[in-house]
Image (spheres, rainbow, N blue to C red):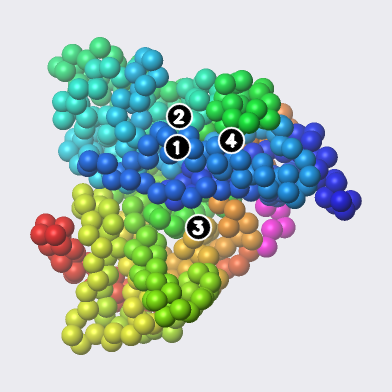
Amino acid sequence: MSQTTETVANVIREGRTALGIELGSTRIKAVLIGPDFRPLASGGHDWENEFDGQYWTYSLASIHQGLRESFRALSDAVSEQYGVTLNTVGAIGVSAMMHGYMAFDADGTLLTPFRTWRNNTTGQASAELSAQFDFPIPQRWSIAHLYQAILNHEEHVSRIDHLTTLAGYIHWQLTGQRVLGTGEASGLFPLDPATGGFDQAKLDVFDQLIKARQLPWQIRDLLPGILAAGRNAGTLSESGARFLDPTGQLSSGIPLCPPEGDAGTGMVATNSITPRTGNVSAGTSVFAMIVLEQPLKKVHEEIDLVMTPDGHPVAMVHANNCTSDYDAWIQLFIEYNQALGIDIAKPRVYDTLLELALKGDADGGGLLSYGYISGEHITGFEQGRPLFVRPADSRFNLANFMRTQLFASLGVLRTGLNILFDQEEVQVDEIRGHGGFFKTRGVGSRIMAAATETPIVILETAGEGGAWGIALLAAFMNRSSDSLSLDQFLRQEVFSGQLTETTRPDPRDVDGFRQFFQLYQRGLPVERAAVDHL
């Protein structure tokens, strides 16, 4: 064993580490970081959502299995790389896909299958609550799911004891504490920026709204506690340790930071938590987070108003669909190669096809695509139908096809950003990108710069993602006695001296995306017809 390896092994044995676990849409990832906040080892587990009845969901069995598999993979990696058993860590943080609906009874039984952020089934609730609150309540938010269940007269509503999100559920299983971090809580029910707690006036409005239903609870009774970044959110219980690690090797008593959603961890992982900073997370879904200097001038149903983990107001543009449809198209090319007996590694297929997009016509040759595997709130679709259309006079070739797929994956995002940039005149100096969209170097960043008309910055750690972001929040909790703010911790301790790669908008690409976007907007009735008739 080398001296460097032995040094790291001692760090792990002594628990001078932090563990971050994030349950994303297609992958659960566990990352162990050391005292310098760099990843030491990671493990993961791939999974996919299911369409059960009318809802996108993940079963509790798949949640539990996936969580344990990702931790087991991490433990195996630590053993293989450093020759030590992962018995303890300095702190743990849990993150997961934000929003959604998990309602439990007094015995801790889940009353309905987990309804994820991907469901656009709460249109009536979203509209009514937004009007009543004078505050945008997107369809994904937990309170929209609850109110829609009330409007639908769902039997389980009267038996609800508490509500939480997926991150909150896992944290509860590990610690027994029903709490959420500030960022995640802001997507469950609106917060009061002055207090950092749930907005008391809006809680009263909601209770009055449902008074005639004569339910045996008030909304305050159902909501979890809220903790800002840096606070201790409980310790790993004996049962929690066995829940995470059935082998019995992991010790209990480890402190946990407040659980966060992938929006909050994305902001941390890209150091985008101060006004005029922004980040975009692009993978299965795509969302941009712009930290605001001042409140928006009016309510926009297309824009989420949430918070950073340390309580700064954020405008969020969220699209349910991003890479999934072009992933499916690329899989066709992979199957084609296999049918011909050609063995080409999957990453090379991706890189080759995506790089072709940069050689296409600026506007994608007049081709049009909608990657709506599920609905899109911003453009008004409760359901989606992936769709590719080409006019007879379009320039149909592989380069234009791939460019159109990338452009289409950002069409909904651009729709929301136009509201922020044009109507609200929100200013942002740069947008920091992370996620699978940026994996092929120089492609995703260039297309994103064209779609947002803003410089796109990729950090050298961008590939680490939200699991690394929640590990940083866990480490920050253990450093909170140093009296550093989260911003200071990230700037001075974590990101100081880190390399970045900046892609500025190319005028040709910008003009091409604008032309494509005009076609995209004109073609929305075609997508509507597909939803209505297929």
| Residue type, label 1 | Ile
Which residue is painted at 48% across and 74% down in the image? 349
Which residue is painted at 34% across and 56% down in the image? 321
N-term-proximal mark, 3 vs 2: 2
* Structural distance between the alpha carbons of marks 4 and 2: 13 Å
- Crowd band around label 4 with a 10 angstrom C-alpha radius: few (<14), some (14–19), many (20+): many
- Do the residues bearing badges 1 and 2 touch, measured as CB atoms within 8 Å? yes
Give the image quarter of residue 370. bottom left
Residue carrying label 3 = 435
**Secondary-structure class at tag 2:** helix
Give the image quarter of residue 205. top left
In the image, residue 494 lies in the stretch drawn in magenta: yes
Residue carrying label 2 = 169
N-term-proximal mark, 4 vs 2: 4
Which quarter shows the C terminus?
A: bottom left
| Residue type, label 2 | Tyr
Name the chief secondary structure element in magenta.
loop
Q: Kindly identify which numbered label has been placed on residue 93.
A: 4
Is residue 432 positioned above or below 389 on the image? above
* Structural distance between the alpha carbons of marks 4 and 1: 16 Å
Query: Which residues lie in the magenta part?
Result: 492-499
N-term-proximal mark, 4 vs 1: 1
Q: Is residue 518 visible?
A: no
Give the image quarter of residue 249. top right
- Do the residues bearing badges 3 and 2 touch, measured as CB atoms within 8 Å? no
Query: Which percent across, then down, holds residue 371?
Result: 30, 63
> Farthest right residue?
3
Residue carrying label 1 = 63
